Image (spheres, rainbow, N blue to C red):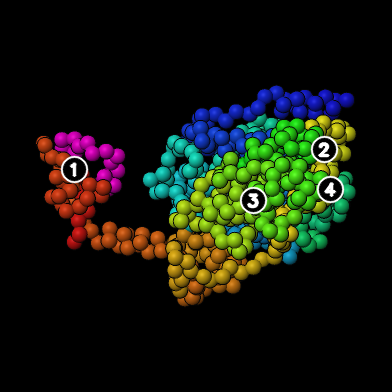
Amino acid sequence: MSIIIFLMASLSSLAQAPMVVPSEMEFAGVKLKITNSAKKEIEETLDLLTRSQYHFQLLVDRSNLYMGMVEEVLKKEGIPDDFKFLAIQEGQFISDAVSTSNAVGFWQFKKASAQELGLRVDGVVDERKHIIASTVGATKYFKRSNFVFDNWLWSMQSYLQGLGGAQRTIPEKDYGAKKVEINAKTHWYLKKYIAHKLAFQDYVGSGKRNPELQLATYEGRGKTLRDVSREVNVDTEELKNLNKWLVASRIPDEKSYKVIYPVKSGSKPIAQNTDTPKKEDSKASSNTKATTKQPEKSSNSRTSYAGVRPVEGNIGVFPRVTGNIRNAYEPDQIEMNGIDAIRARASDNIKTLANRVGKSESKIRKYNDLGDNGKIRSGEYYYAKNKKNRGKVHYHIVQPGETLWSISQDYGIKYKKLLQKNRMRETQQLKVGRVLWLRFIRPANVPIEYTDVILPKDNPTPEDKMIKEVSPPEQPIKKQTQIISENKTSFDEDPIEEVEVSTTLKALIATASDTIITHVVQPKESFFALSQKYGIELDDIIDWNGLNVMDGLQINQELRLVVPKAYFSKQADATKTSSRREVYHEVQKGETLWGISRKYNVTIEDILKWNNKTNNNLDLGERLKILQDN
């Protein structure tokens, strides 16, 4: 009874009022001013995360199982506590989550990146799947990138784009900023994070534990899981499910490895003597317990809404079907994304559907971009009027099994307009994880962007199963409409894309914005140093040259790299600057910046930049630094 009361109170608290996006908030010491345009996008993501109380509670509970360990590592490593919500966004606290680009684990690391950050990934252990080790790896990345940006917000953006990608996106004038405006142009990854922080900050972390189920850690160095099983009195199979980071039969003994085990029904974790003479290499050790129940993968799972499968991109859930849903098979009863629509019966074809709507067959084909051979599918929704020229939200992240046609239907945007906004040809392959533009045309100078999509799992996670064991029976959720089981697919001519999970080497191909060079490795150079120097991704260096990050680099080794042309422009500017001499000009009465610039044959903009000035005002006697050619 106490558990039921706990859950009912928790669920009712979630349903008290819709979450509001504030005009101002703080992230890791940076003050964020959120404009109305950005608020709308963030609200769409909040709606996605919190629409189902049941599934939101599951995600809260799984997060709380591990969050205590994450908080401890962040604190020990000097990383702002706000980053803990990024762990929910990245891997949904699924230890063996695998993305479409073969990123793995709690923090979604690719193998090369993980190894470069000091994580062990081999036939013995895969520390990407260990909550403590992987969090330590993530903190190393955040600290490295923050050394460049002096701003934790940009450091977080670089976690998606890579250091080089973020440097190309973020103006240098914004490095070290203490105030940042979040607007329509702000990177979607940051707005998605803000939604996660707002959604979970009152429900996850800071000691929020399930009294019936927690996770604790036990030192396993040199032992087998069977040994640990006897010592903590937990079934070996249960330990295996919670410790998928262990690949071999025995835990290595060269450093500390914390085995995760469950503590149920108010029991206390097993006390353990920690006076160990062997070296402690792990960045974080913990005897912590973490908290409660399960979540579902919110950003990648599919829930039913108004009888259709919603598309869950980075913001919003589409399609949106409103009106008299019970009579959806009849005309003038429902709208999909604000456009008149109708649902197809099992016996429908183009002719019968058109007759019911009172439109010609050609118009139904036109409204739904069906072409000459597109067929009607039972239970699907079709538009009875023209779709829009642009979507209601800005972006969509392509999920497995989707096509351009199905996305155009889900968002109510014309198929050709969707192609146009993304500068795509009709024959171009659509890759999972691509960020599609829905409202505006992607600028020519903005590269195509991809993000990892975690592949859905058929079976519930071990954490989910344990949570259900200590939870009351699931209550049926009241549905407003009939839920259909079939997945939404496109018309016959669009084959469903097969997702390739295996690692593939990236081709060494230059585009209009970059060029191929040969770099000769110098003493003390590392993969990370080269990545930072040229503004390219570490994993790309590995792929282009068929290397293994664990082998390191050799002096005079030749590497083929695809380097942005902007790098050479910066080098030229730096060379030009280094060949100049510094002089100082003392401002006299009546002098202006224009007059001073003419005197030294430089630009006003240069003088402002050299002296960190934000306006043209001058003070009598002010000393201005001028750089002149030798």
Residue holding disc 2: 482
Q: Residue at the spot x=61%, y=42% of the render?
A: 315
Q: Which mark is residue 593?
A: 1
Bin the neighbour count of mark 3 within 10 Å (Cα to Cα): few under 14, some 14-19, many 20 and up. Answer: some
Q: Are marks 4 and 3 in contact (CB under 8 Å)?
A: no
Magenta segment: does it hold 620? yes
Q: Is residue 253 visible?
A: no
Q: Nearer the viewer, mark 2 or mark 4?
A: 4
Q: Of the residues shown, which amino acid type is indicated by label 3?
A: Lys
The alpha-carbon separation of the residues under discs 3 and 2 comes to 28 Å
Circle number at residue 616: none
Chain-order first, disc 2 or disc 4:
4
At label 4, the amino acid type is Ala
Q: Which mark, by number, is residue 346?
A: 4
Where 340 falls versus 218 (above or below)?
Answer: above
The residues tagged by marks 1 and 2 sit, at their Cα atoms, a distance apart of: 72 Å
Residue drawn at the location 26% of the way across and 45% of the way down: 608
Q: In the rendered view of the protein, which quadrant contains the C terminus?
A: bottom left
Q: Distance from label 4 to label 1 (Cα)? A: 77 Å
Q: Secondary structure at mark 3?
A: helix
Image location of residue 606, percent across then percent down: 25, 49
In the rendered image, which quarter is residue 19 located in?
top right
Say few, some or many: other residues with alpha carbon within 10 Å of mark 1 (under 14 / 14 to 19 / 20 or more): some
Magenta segment range? 607-622
Position above or below: 95 against 120: above
Q: Amino acid at mark 1?
A: Leu
Residue 519, position as x, y percentages in the image: 45, 72
Who comes first in sequence, dot 3 or dot 2? Answer: 3
- Residue that appears at 51% across and 29% down: 23
Q: In this rendered view, identify the residue nearer to me: 235 or 58.
A: 58
Of marks 1 and 3, the one in the foreground = 3
